[in-house]
Image (tube, rainbow, N blue to C red):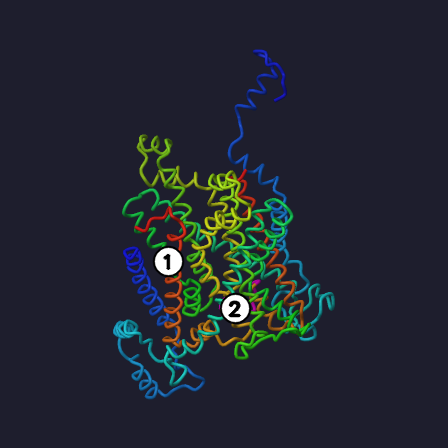
């Protein structure tokens, strides 16, 4: 087990290194600099500012210095938000994104698995068709369509919920963003669960369990579900990536102070260190989730050997 | 069969024999199954109409997509000659929608082709050569899989400015990973088949075998995946456009239209509703065709 984790970490670290390298040089290749403000700085002042952030040195030296900092957990100062380090910005804003992402994935799993199991048990009946229609709609209606439409109908026309803002994380402000993030995940999860369940229900050991005379309820819960949700575990990593992508849209539309909103703005403003910090944060998050997924897979599936 | 007794030399017999001998190829079977699938046929009809509208539609609208009319600002649908209304600059939504659909479909097609070429080449080479090379090539894919790709696409757009060629390449370069995995898996199972051995025995080199024997035989799953990649690409481009990083005005794509519609939706619902509907219908028809093709070509659950 430990060796397995060790091996996966050995792959994860070069991956993270690659991410940092590519992002660093891409960001620097972009025309413009973080100090191109509305007012043009005089050459002397600009030189001073560049020197202050070490940006007067050759690029490879800056890269080395940045890497050294990252290894020590120092992501540098923000170039746009005066007096703030990148870590502070991450700390101040991750809560919004985390709340949205976690709620969405938990809700989507509960609803998606239930719908998927229901559809599999009533295969080719009306319930199945209804669930699968929802699944197709969920995949085909992107978040940037559901979000404005829901705001228009539920917030603007009906006035049931606030249309935007964080408001300290009050529940009414959270409902619409979470619903928007959850819908596509429900669609994918229910599809995966249904497919897994249909296959498992046909297998020999389920037939054995039936032959033993176990009640259907118990067969589904104890024997079938465990095997059927295995594909879901592998979906953990991609789900996180999907939620992050979705949060970029949702945070923009609902005007929420999360990380996603920061990323695009910072990239456009050439706030190098903030962009890098977010890329590292999200890459590490996805790598860790993939590792957890692999471990869970091994624990749940006795056929997988950790080697 | 008809139950006719086949006497030697009879014409009926010869015809029947000929029919039987011609047989039904796998592709014939697949086409038959596909045409029986109502959702897939519906998807094909709708998509055909959409493609037709995108190609010839812009020539028949009364206004050009970038024509600004000061007197027609916020014109609701069916007024002042605007079938679907007009936007904040008085531009005709129908013309913009058709142009946007054209751009989105073109991006879907081109970026998918890019991903197809990279993915098939990568997967076929890795699977066919096997061993060390295979391991390294697939490890690269694994590593790329675990990257937050959307960030790189965003960085790419920010770095080089959003021109349409770059959108093609950036999205195509992201979408090839799954394709290469599918192709590699197929190649692994194909390369030990007798006909490949026969080709090798006849003196064909590795390149020739990959190009002439491996790739044509893995078309099935690739076709299925292509029909599912196109909507994913359209979605990715729209997502970029929504964040303001995709197609730049006055050009339009479905994503930019939806983004603008979302800004102005309180004043002009039609700017949000019609582009959104078009987007959803387009994505759905692709997905129906893709699902239908998968059931037809790879009928695991028949």
Which quadrant would residue A24 be assigned to in this image? bottom left
Residue B120 against residue B212 in the figure, above or below: below
- Residue with the mark numbered 2: A249
Q: Quadrant of the N terminus of chain A?
A: bottom left
Magenta includes B247? Answer: yes
Q: What residue do we see at 70% from left, 71% from top?
A: B75
Q: How crowded is the residue under tag 1: few (<14 C-alpha within 10 Å), some, or many (20+)?
A: some
Q: Residue A103: x, y in percent?
A: 51, 67
Please tell me which residue lies in front, A7 or A136. Answer: A7
- Residue with the mark numbered 1: B144
Magenta includes B202? Answer: no
**Disc 2 element:** helix
Q: Main secondary structure of the magenta part?
A: loop
Residue B297 seen from this side? no
Q: What residue do we see at 52% from left, 75% from top?
A: A256
Real-space Cα separation, disc 1 to disc 2, in angstroms: 23 Å
Q: Which residues are magenta?
A: B243-254
Please tell me which residue lies in front, B83 or A304. Answer: A304
Q: Residue B74: x, y in percent?
A: 68, 73
Q: Is residue A249 left or right of residue B273?
A: left
Residue B190 against residue B22 in the figure, above or below: below
**Disc 1 element:** helix
Please tell me which residue lies in front, B243 or A14. Answer: A14
Chain assignment, label 2: A
Chain assignment, label 1: B
Q: Residue A29: x, y in percent?
A: 36, 70
Which quadrant would residue B152 be assigned to in this image? bottom left
Q: Residue B86: x, y in percent?
A: 67, 69
Q: How crowded is the residue under tag 2: few (<14 C-alpha within 10 Å), some, or many (20+)?
A: many
């Amino acid at each position: 087990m430990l060796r397995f984790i060790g091996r996966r970490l050995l792959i994860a670290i070069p991956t993270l290194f690659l991410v940092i390298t590519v992002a660093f040089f891409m960001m620097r290749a972009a025309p413009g600099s973080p100090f191109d403000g509305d007012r043009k700085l005089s050459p002397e002042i600009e030189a001073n500012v560049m020197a202050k952030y070490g940006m007067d040195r050759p690029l490879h030296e800056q890269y080395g210095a940045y890497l050294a900092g990252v290894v020590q957990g120092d992501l540098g100062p923000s170039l746009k938000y005066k007096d703030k380090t990148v870590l502070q910005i991450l700390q101040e804003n991750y809560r919004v994104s985390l709340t949205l992402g976690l709620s969405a994935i938990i809700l989507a799993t509960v609803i998606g698995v239930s719908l998927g199991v229901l559809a599999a048990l009533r295969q080719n009946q009306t319930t199945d068709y209804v669930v699968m229609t929802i699944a197709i709609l969920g995949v085909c209606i992107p978040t940037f369509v559901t979000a404005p439409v829901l705001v228009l109908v539920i917030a603007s026309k009906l006035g049931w919920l606030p249309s935007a803002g964080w408001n300290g994380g009050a529940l009414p402000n959270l409902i619409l963003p979470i619903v928007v993030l959850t819908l596509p995940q429900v669609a994918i999860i229910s599809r995966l669960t249904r497919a897994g369940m249909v296959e498992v229900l046909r297998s020999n050991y389920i037939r054995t369990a039936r032959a033993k005379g176990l009640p259907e309820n118990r067969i589904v819960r104890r024997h079938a579900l465990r095997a059927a949700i295995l594909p879901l575990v592998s979906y953990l990593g991609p789900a996180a990536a999907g939620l992050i992508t979705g949060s970029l849209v949702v945070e923009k539309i609902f005007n929420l102070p999360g990380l996603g909103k920061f990323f695009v703005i910072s990239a456009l403003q050439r706030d190098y260190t903030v962009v890098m910090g977010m890329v590292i944060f999200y890459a590490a998050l996805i790598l860790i989730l993939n590792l957890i997924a692999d471990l869970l897979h091994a624990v749940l599936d006795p056929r997988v050997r950790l080697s | 069969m008809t139950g006719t007794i086949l006497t030697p030399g009879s014409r009926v017999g010869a015809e029947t024999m000929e029919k039987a001998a011609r047989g039904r190829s796998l592709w014939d079977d697949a086409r038959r199954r596909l045409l029986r699938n109502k959702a897939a046929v519906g998807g094909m009809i709708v998509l055909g109409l959409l493609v037709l509208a995108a190609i010839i539609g812009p020539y028949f609208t009364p206004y050009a997509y970038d024509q600004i009319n000061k007197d027609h600002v916020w014109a609701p649908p069916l007024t002042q000659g605007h079938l679907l209304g007009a936007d904040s600059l008085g531009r005709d939504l129908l013309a913009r929608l058709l142009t946007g659909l054209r751009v989105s479909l073109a991006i879907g097609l081109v970026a998918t082709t890019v991903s197809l070429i990279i993915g098939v080449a990568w997967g076929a080479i890795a699977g066919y050569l096997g061993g060390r090379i295979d391991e390294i090539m697939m490890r690269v894919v694994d590593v790329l899989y675990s990257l937050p790709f959307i960030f790189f696409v965003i960085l790419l757009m920010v770095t080089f400015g959003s021109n349409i060629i770059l959108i093609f390449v950036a999205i195509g370069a992201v979408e090839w990973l799954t394709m290469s995995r599918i192709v590699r898996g197929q190649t692994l199972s194909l390369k030990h088949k007798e006909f490949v051995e026969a080709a090798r025995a006849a003196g064909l080199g590795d390149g020739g075998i990959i190009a002439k024997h491996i790739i044509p035989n893995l078309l099935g799953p690739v076709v299925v995946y292509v029909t599912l990649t196109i909507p994913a690409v359209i979605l990715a481009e729209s997502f970029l456009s929504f964040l303001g990083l995709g197609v730049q005005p006055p050009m339009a794509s479905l994503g930019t239209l939806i983004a603008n519609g979302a800004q102005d939706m309180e004043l002009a619902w039609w700017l949000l509703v019609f582009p959104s509907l078009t987007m959803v219908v387009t994505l759905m028809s692709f997905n129906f065709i893709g699902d239908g093709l998968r059931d037809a070509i790879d009928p695991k659950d028949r």
